[in-house]
Every structure is written in C-alpha cells, then in structure tokens.
Image: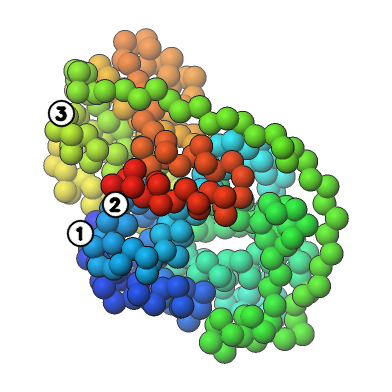
Amino acid sequence: MKMFTTSRSQLIKNIINFSENELSNYSKKRNFDFGPPHKNVSKLSPYLRTRFISEEEVLKIAVSKNNIKNIEKFIEEIFWRTYWRGWLESHPWIYHEYLDTSKHQLLPKKTGIKCFDKWKEELIDTGYLHNHSRMWFASIWIFTLGYSWQSGAEFFKRNLLDFCPASNTLGWRWVAGLQTINKPYLALSDNINHFTNGRFNPIGQLNEKVKLNYIEQNSSHVLTFIKPEKIEFKNFDNIGIILNRNDLSLNHIFKNKEITYECCVYSNEHENKLINEFNKNIIQDIIENNKNFEITENHNQIFNWLANKKIKNLILPYETVGNKIFNIEKFKNKLKQLNIQYNFFLRDWDRNAFPYATKGFFKFKKNIPNLINLAKI
C-alpha cells in the first residue's frame, strides 16, 4: 500500500484535499489509529522533515480552507517538530549521550502482543506509524519488553521515513520518563482498545504500573541559541545552493526574491531500501521540475560542480543537532582553498521559533500566534 507520494504537485493536491475534507475533524480524530492509510491524519511528517514542502506552505493552504481558530490543534502539531529541533539546539549533549548508548537490540520476530507485532510490521513495511501508536509502541518496548529506550530510538531511526534526530530522541525520552522527569507515558490496554476502534485490546499483556526514580541532571543548564548573521544575498555574485535532506526547498526563498542562482541536490544512500527509494524518488521529482539542477552524490562531485558553475558564494541549509552533513572542517577547509564563501542558511521560521524552545512545549505554544504572524500566514 503506497501512502506517500513523491511528487510535489500531487503532495500539494493531497494537502488541499485533506484541508477541505478532513482537517475540520482533525482534533477529534487525530488520536485514533484506524490503520493504514490513516486518512484522519495528514501524514506530512516525511515531507516536513526534509522540507520537501515548508511549514509555511502547508499552513497557508490549511488556513485558506479553514478558520484558523478551528484548526489550532493541527497548527500546534506542525510546531511540535520545530519545538523539538529548537529544544535540542539548546541541549545538544542530550543527543550526544543518546549516541553513546544507542546500541541496537534485536526483537524476537513475534512478541505475542498482537498490536505491538502489527505496528512493528507496519513500520518496516511502510516506513510510518501513527503518532499515538509510536507512543504505545515505545512504551511497550521499554516497560513491558524491558528494552532500552535508546535501542528503541535506534530501531525507529533505521525504519522511519520521517526520522528526525530531535523528534525521535526526545520523543523516546518523553515516553521513558526522562524528558518530563519520572513521568513516563504508559501504554494502557483500555486506551489502546478505544483509540484503535477495537482493533486491538492487549488486556493483561502490558506492564501498566511503573514507578521511576530518575535523578534529573543538567535540568537548569540551557545553551543560548545564537542565530547566524542574517545576510542580504541580493548583492552576491555567482550564488550556488546545495539542497539536501535538511532542506529540499531552500531554493524557493531565493526564487521568490528573484535572486539568480545555480543549484544542485545532494543525494546520499540510506541503508534502508524503502527509505532510500523514497528519498531518491523525491530528488528525481525535484530534478524533473528544475531542468538546470544537478544531482551530486559525494564531495568530489560537489567540488566539480562548484568549479564548472564558477560559484563564488555557496548557500547550504542550516544544520541542527544530529543533522550534520557539510558543517565539518574537511569540507569547509576545501571551500576556503577554492576561495568560495559559504553560509549555512537558517530559515526565518526557525530563527523566530528556536529562542522560545528552551523549556516545555506549553510555554513555547504561547508564542505560536506571534510566530504565525511573523510567517505572514
């Protein structure tokens, strides 16, 4: 069952259709996992993760079809991904600690817990799970099966189309009772029964009582997010843009400002065949709709492209914690040798939101109306 288009034009049609026909009931139905193809939720996460389409584009469509007051929950859900990325920017050691302890643990083929086994199969087969099922799955993984949260986060990392270092790491920590200290998310059989519309009822199979005694560490230690300098690119000559999985539509900003540029798309292999095919097809759609764009697959191809196009000023998507691709000394030193100026471009969406994402989401969401205004939605 193909749930995810890799055509941008079709994606926009899907968003319009969802906004017209499903969004008005989103707040009532969003927590229900009715099973694939999950028509009651937007399934936009794989596209927002790579910004194949931007948050502003999605919300402008949604607001054009609905009263903004009636879709507040949907808007909040769009901002959750932004919030997690911003939070990890001010707590980067959390991700580094996860990497040190994320050894993969192999699950038995069948656990005997019908819902869990079904979600595992769905994740591997489609690259996706409903958000509520991700929470249940993580809770069962940790508290019923006794695996580490880090290995669960690693399992998701290997299989999710929408894998994001911030959302994944912090989501698993939240379920484990580390993000909100000693307040885990427990999968309850009656909750699963209700929100799967009776498809699953694992009564007597789950550990539904957990008492934790974590000691909170570094809770008051927050790094200040330092925004990169905002640059006016209209005065730059010979601009080149490299799109990658951190931002596949960054060029639209320059196109809308009528700034001339050359562009290539960096495509790297993923060990998961399903994810690799999805990523390749998205990039192919970008290439087919932008005939002057090129695909590059390694640093040498990028350096050749820079030389052939006589690029003097290179624009790269900003790299948040866990998303490092080009912000490494070897690559940057080579650019310096080639006399190429480079900038890691931070979108205004993130520039405006990240400073508010240092504490809990409920404090962050108070700023959403202002962030919406700043985005001119």
Q: Which circle marks residue 9 in the picture?
A: 1
- Which amino acid type is marked by label 2? Ile
Q: Is residue 193 above or below residue 140?
A: below
Task: Give the residue at mark 2.
Answer: 377
For marks 1 and 3, the one nearer the N-term is 1
Tell me how far mark 2 sits from mark 1, CA to CA. Answer: 21 Å
Q: Residue at x 46, y 78 (%)?
A: 28
**Which numbered mark, 2 or 3, is in the foreground of this view?**
2
Task: Give the residue at mark 3.
Answer: 260
Q: Is residue 235 above or below residue 113?
A: above
Q: Quadrant of residue 205?
A: bottom right
- Which amino acid type is marked by label 1? Ser
Q: Residue at x 22, y 34 (%)?
A: 254
Name the quarter where the N terminus is drawn.
bottom left
Q: Decide: marks 2, 3 in contact (CB < 8 A)?
A: no
Determine the secondary structure under disc 3: loop
Rendered location of residue 159, percent (x, y): 52, 58
Tell me how far mark 1 sits from mark 3, CA to CA. Answer: 24 Å
For marks 2 and 1, the one nearer the N-term is 1
For marks 2 and 3, the one nearer the N-term is 3
Q: Residue at x 28, y 62 (%)?
A: 63
**Crowd class of label 3 (few under 14; some 14 to 19; many from 20; radius 10 Å):** some
Determine the secondary structure under disc 2: loop
Determine the secondary structure under disc 1: helix
In the picture, measured across the screen, residue 306 lies left or right of residue 34, that is left
Q: Decide: marks 2, 1 in contact (CB < 8 A)?
A: no
Question: Which is more toward the observer, 92 or 272?
Answer: 92
Rendered location of residue 233, percent (x, y): 24, 23
